[in-house]
Image (cartoon, helix red, strand yellow):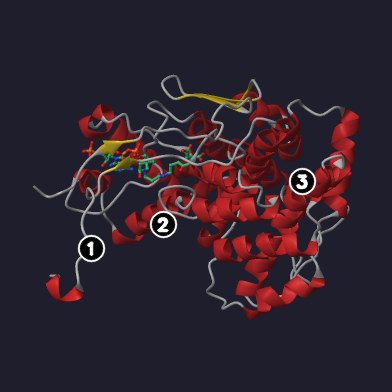
Amino acid sequence: DSGLVSLDYGYTNTGSTKSQITFVDGEKGILRYRGYNIEDLAAYTTFPETAWLLIYGNLPTREELGTFRRLLTENALIHENLLNFFREMPPSAHPMGILGAVVNALGLFTPRFYDDESKQDAFNLTVASLISKVRTIAAFSYKASIGEPFVYPDAEKSYCSNFLNMMFSSKAKPYNVDPLFVHALNVLLIVHADHEQNCSTSTVRMVGSSQASLYASICAGICALWGPLHGGANQAALETLMNIHQSGLTVKQVIEKAKNKKDPFKLYGFGHRVYKNYDPRAKVLKGLVHTIFDREHIADPLLDIASELEEAALNDDYFIERKLYPNVDFYSGILYHAMEIPTNMLTVMFAIGRLPGWIAHWKEMHDDPLSKINRPRQIYTGYAERPWLPIDNRG
Ligand code: SDX
């Protein structure tokens, strides 16, 4: 009698959800990029190598990697007109908002390459330029937020070393890039590089399917990643650990809060739509945390809390029944914190890592001659046909 009906037009999503890029087995906790296990890529490659693998389909030869590294170095600068953007934003502006806006603006300085598909070089240049420039944008947004002068990219430094230098060096205080942190940053970016049809990657495919530019599609992916249920969870997970440390809450109290449905409290960094087992990326990062903290003799109460929290959750029926395990966001924040990357930059770090995956999916879709604009259908649950009502007969 509510007049509501349920008309099922069926789900016909014309977007391709077939992909050759990443394989995830949620039950077994397996993640592979183009067939290579994430554990091997984290242990033996650098982020540029893995980025190339995702986008072009194979691990690069020495020559291909050399060319890619050169393009990354040569295209690290952003147009000087864009610097005003950082200065005009409030210091409290969230770096994800700045990243999305400036990436979209990059497209205004660059011709749309796929107007002429034959220009593969133009695509390769755009890819290297985007992957290089997001690092510069991130570092500049941090410098602007603390009122320090920008540190420009250094042509002599590697991808990750350059980023740390742009973030933390200044004319006033020397900054020696720690090779261990460079290694850790490579691993962090590698494990974030792709994850099949997650929310932000599906967004990039959705926007890209309309033939919007790569820059506009990536900007949409950045906006989707920002949400605390997705990429924003790493910031929320670290803040949860910090709040526990500052509040003196016991781990047992935190576990009980997470189970209390009346309380909006979530244990960020736990649970996953696909992984119903330990997220293999969390395993890699957990190992890295202990390696770094042992070697650098770092004693961080946040790591102690995280370890206790994980132990308690993995032995709690609520979590066991729901197959809630640590996900990629649970340990990443602790590593970034150790590198002194500020909490509000954590989702930007996720975006820097995820960019090659977004580009790979965008390319895969554009390379598919059968690809069409995504247009999911729906199950209509609204009113059946109704006659129009004059305004005096309403209410
Ligand atoms: C990422 O898709 C991807 O691949 C994403 C990602 C990628 O690489 O792109 O892997 C990156 O986004 C990782 C996830 C980061 N998000 C968080 O850590 C936020 C906290 N996690 C939850 O919000 C949740 O686990 C999700 C969103 C990740 C997954 O949610 P689902 O699959 O929709 O599961 P759900 O919300 O329906 O939860 C099922 C049950 C519910 O309890 P009941 O209703 O059955 O009683 O589990 C509970 C939930 O309340 N639950 C949690 C919980 N996660 C799920 N309870 C407490 N704390 C949590 N973290």
Percent position (x, y) of residue 60?
81, 29
Q: Which quadrant, please, contains the C terminus? A: bottom left
N-terminal label among 2 and 3? 3
Residue type highlighted by circle 1: Trp
- Left/right of residue 371 with respect to residue 163 in the rendered view: left
- Left/right of residue 310 with respect to residue 186 in the rendered view: left
On residue 388, the disc is 1
Residue 196 quadrant? top right
Name the residue tied to disc 2.
Answer: 239
- Compared with residue 99, is residue 181 higher up or lower down, i.e. above or below? above
The residue at the point 12 percent across, 50 percent down is: 2
- Compared with residue 217, is residue 78 higher up or lower down, i.e. above or below? below
| Badge 2 vs badge 3, beta-carbon distance below 8 Å | no
1 or 3: mark nearer the eye: 1
Q: Is residue 290 visible?
A: yes
The residue at the point 84 percent across, 55 percent down is: 75
Residue 52 quadrant? top right
- Residue in the foreground of this view, choosing between 125 and 286: 125
Percent position (x, y) of residue 340?
59, 58
Q: Which element carries disc 2, helix, strand or loop?
A: helix
2 or 3: mark nearer the eye: 3
N-terminal label among 1 and 3? 3
Q: Which element carries disc 1, helix, strand or loop?
A: loop
| Badge 1 vs badge 3, beta-carbon distance below 8 Å | no
- Judge the density around disc 3: few (<14), some (14-19), many (≥20) Cα neighbours within 10 Å: many
Q: Which element carries disc 3, helix, strand or loop?
A: helix
